[in-house]
Amino acid sequence: MQTLGNLINNEAVAGRSERHATVYNPATGEPRLYVSLSSADETREAIAAAQAAFDGWSKTPPLVRARVMFRFKDLLERRRDDVARLITSEHGKVFSDAQGEVTRGLEVVEFACGIPHLLKGEFSSNVGRDIDSNSLMQPLGVCAGITPFNFPAMVPLWMLPVAIACGNTFVLKPSEKDPSATMLIGELLAEAGLPAGVLNIVNGDKEAVDVLLTDERVQSVSFVGSTPIAEYIYATASAHGKRCQALGGAKNHMVVMPDADPQQVVSSLMGAAYGSAGERCMAISVAVCVGDEVADKLVEMLKGEISLMRTGPGLGVEPEPHMGPLVTREHQQKVSGYIDLGVEEGATLVCDGRGIKVEGHENGFYVGPTLFDRVTPSMRIYREEIFGPVLAVVRVASFDEALQLINDHEFGNGTSIFTRDGDTARQFEENVKVGMVGVNVPIPVPMAFHCFGGWKRSVFGPLNMHGPDGVRFFTRMKTVTRRWPTGIRAGAEFAMPTMK
Ligand code: NAD
């Protein structure tokens, strides 16, 4: 079986650590390839390559850097289906969903194509008599990224285009569960004309990550993954003087008000809860029904829709299944374990996805769509992130109770409300303690020119991904105050300078 190595200086380099992980095809349960787990020394070599490339790349005019992004955008558009096929083969999500993932990543490349405009900085004339002031947005140096399994193309593309277009060089550590799509993206950037060393990809695990967090040549760390690891990454990177943005886990609630259109709610919930088998940080995993009548009707309608859902391999089956497998056997067991737990905790199991058999794919890592009713806030299946196709219905008596429930939850990534009432929607937008809010939109993922990020324990660090925050994260501001020689005719001044 092939062993995937690293991408250093635009060249594929075999791993030397003699440690590797197995990457599976989750649809069949068969091993696909090995991925090398890089040693600390191999990671340091990647940092050295990025460090060596920084001077030349940071001095390359932004317009020229943007042209590389334009060529990359073109290549990524043309190779979109190749990237998507790799995603489906290793992550398991169905092909059309994988194509959508690449498109959302492409939108960040389009945003980065406008980098000359985004780096213009600020200018004030005559801040004091004959004195001008302007800000320069300069790149940081070597930036590091560590990415999760659930979006092997989109999440690296949240970071790479903006960081690189800003003039930084980069070392990326993809998820060891599905690294191939990320590697192809690296190859396409090289083909687009990115100079050697500007992007280096090291495959690996904690050993590689710990070097990125502590090596003094690395200036910033961008992380997306689970909350315990995000917290560790933020604490360690910060303790080593690095700028850090670390996005963590989620438990996203959708509030269903009595005036919402039931069919619209059900259609939205089905996609938001079960799309990508629930392995999305913006998946809806809790439906909060205001009133028993709303809940009874919703559960009945969901039950009907779930019975029509097809679960199967993400490639090669017509018509395409609605939902693919989970990423690994361990994750399949973890999600099934949460369904056992929900039953033990006393929730009502309406649809049970455990033990589902997909014909011809009996060893695949499948869990079918699962629905719990009468889930309460004290249950672990409510409090913890399951990250699978498991939707919990929580019943509350009022809008205020729904809002309080969401605000009391540890996570605050995304949320949505379904209502026809503008005042209720406005109260929700204003008062909910969550970073990304949808009104009659189930998965409110911001576009590339806005910022992506949650609140509370869904994020560590002040600046979010892409949009204006992305540019601010990957640059440091320098403010110049300038007076030309004729301005010093009046001689030295010894009092604190103030504007005259
Ligand atoms: P994970 O935290 O297990 O792994 C993420 C990355 O961290 C991987 O590259 C992994 O190799 C590395 N890693 C894992 N353990 C480590 C350790 N002990 N020390 C150093 N590095 C380590 O997450 P995952 O299972 O790959 O992804 C799913 C999680 O990501 C979910 O919790 C999901 O909510 C979250 N996620 C969040 C967002 C967001 O925007 N907030 C987006 C996507 C995914």
Image (cartoon, helix red, strand yellow):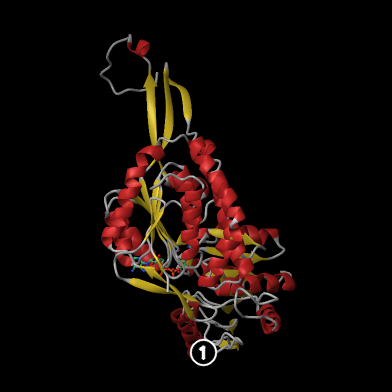
Where is residue 249 drawn, in percent x and y? Answer: 46, 67
Mark 1, Cα crowd under 10 Å, few <14 / some 14-19 / many 20+, is few
Judge from the rendering whether residue 19 lies leftward or rightward of residue 252; answer left or right.
Answer: left
Quadrant of the image containing the C terminus: top left
The residue to which callout 1 is attached is: 343
**Disc count in the image?**
1
Label 1, ligand 1: CB separation under 8 Å: no
Who is closer to the viewer here, 499 or 52?
Answer: 52
In the image as oriented, which residue stretches furthest toward the front? Answer: 1
Where is residue 375 drawn, in percent x and y? Answer: 54, 82
Who is closer to the viewer here, 105 or 425?
Answer: 105
Q: Is residue 13 visible?
A: yes
Who is closer to the viewer here, 95 or 487?
Answer: 95
Where is residue 82 drawn, in percent x and y? Answer: 57, 62
Q: Is residue 448 visible?
A: no
Who is closer to the viewer here, 104 or 79?
Answer: 79
Q: Residue at x 70, y 82 (%)?
A: 308
Quadrant of the image containing the N terminus: bottom left
Ligand 1 picture quarter: bottom left
Residue 134 quadrant: top left
Q: Residue at x 67, y 74 (%)?
A: 320
Judge from the rendering whether residue 173 lies leftward or rightward of residue 118; answer left or right.
Answer: left
Q: Is residue 6 above or below residue 195?
A: below
Label 1, secondary structure: give it. helix
Residue 96 quadrant: bottom right
